[in-house]
Amino acid sequence: MTAVSDPRELGAFLKACRAQLTPGACGLPDPDTPRKVAGLRREEVAGLAAISVDYYTRLEQGRVRASASVLATLVRALRLDEDQQTYLYDLAGRTDARPRRRTPQRPRPAMLRLLDQLTQTPAMVLGRRLDILAWNPAATALYTDFSALPQGRRNYLHLLFTDPGFRGLYREWRSDARDAVAALRMEAATDPDDQDLASLVGELSVRDKDFSTWWAEHRVITATYGTKRYRHHLVGDLTLDCDTWACPDGSGQRLMVLTAEPGSPSYDALRILTSWTAGHPADRETLRDRTA
């Protein structure tokens, strides 16, 4: 591990890297007026990295030493290439602390078989960071055509905050969204060096004030069941029980299933909605093509 001879060198490097970026390249809104200086502002980098502006400022000023988890978030926020990453870790004296690359998430075959058999109830397989790994036709009918989304955007939390159609389904959006943030906060504690999670939190913190506020609350939940209320453009209001079962293999995958009380208006509406997709062989045959 290389010792840091002058923390100011790390700060100067961070400043130079953010000067080379534009808001648009990082998924941020382009400014309406010209900027006095080139590149991203400190507060924008801090938001993308999900750290405080004060902490990032002290990093650039050489007044604090960066942890391995913070370095991981800065790599993503500043879009550093391999050589720049190596240089960053060398300057920080943490060349041995670079997070290992994680294997891609794949839904377990047993989970896919369960999805195949759930023909009249929406169900999805959620992975780390609430990524949507697989889904059945009924989930498509209720939510959206997940297969039409870029793989990197198939994330429950990202859709909940950034997709108007997905967000508009929830009659109690603020409560459901706040609970989802708390669930992600709980997961973050188990893997603080997850760069993809840090990137997700950074992006949503910049794009949505509610997310930023709720993330800062440090509220956590582990609830595996509850009630969700939707307003669907085709069948109207739905009140569904949401149950989530964790896979016992330690992969972090969960099966989320939505059901309605038999005989209720929601039960009848859900049967109408799923009847338009259930029973079509083509839908079932393409299920495996709809996995991450």
Image (cartoon, rainbow, N blue to C red):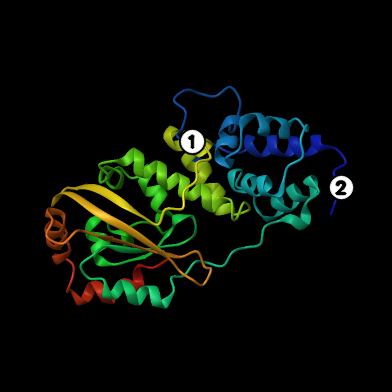
Report the residue marked by disc 1. 212
User: Which of 261 and 27 lies nearest the eye of the viewer?
Assistant: 261
Count of marks placed on residues: 2
Whether tag 1 and tag 2 are in contact, CB under 8 A, the answer is: no
| Element assignment for label 2 | loop
Q: CA distance from mark 1 to mark 2?
A: 35 Å
Relative vertical location of residue 166 with respect to residue 119 in this rendering, above or below:
above
Please name the residue shown 19% across and 51% down the image.
238
Q: Amino acid at mark 1?
A: Ser
In the rendered image, is residue 26 in sight? no
In the rendered image, is residue 239 in sight? yes
Looking at the rendered image, the quarter that the C terminus falls into is bottom left
Residue 31 image position (x, y, % from top left): 47, 28
Q: Looking at the image, tell me whether mark 1 or mark 2 is earlier in sequence order.
A: 2
| Element assignment for label 1 | helix
Q: Nearer the viewer, mark 1 or mark 2?
A: 1
Residue 141 image position (x, y, % from top left): 22, 59
Q: Which mark is residue 3?
A: 2
Q: Amino acid at mark 2?
A: Ala
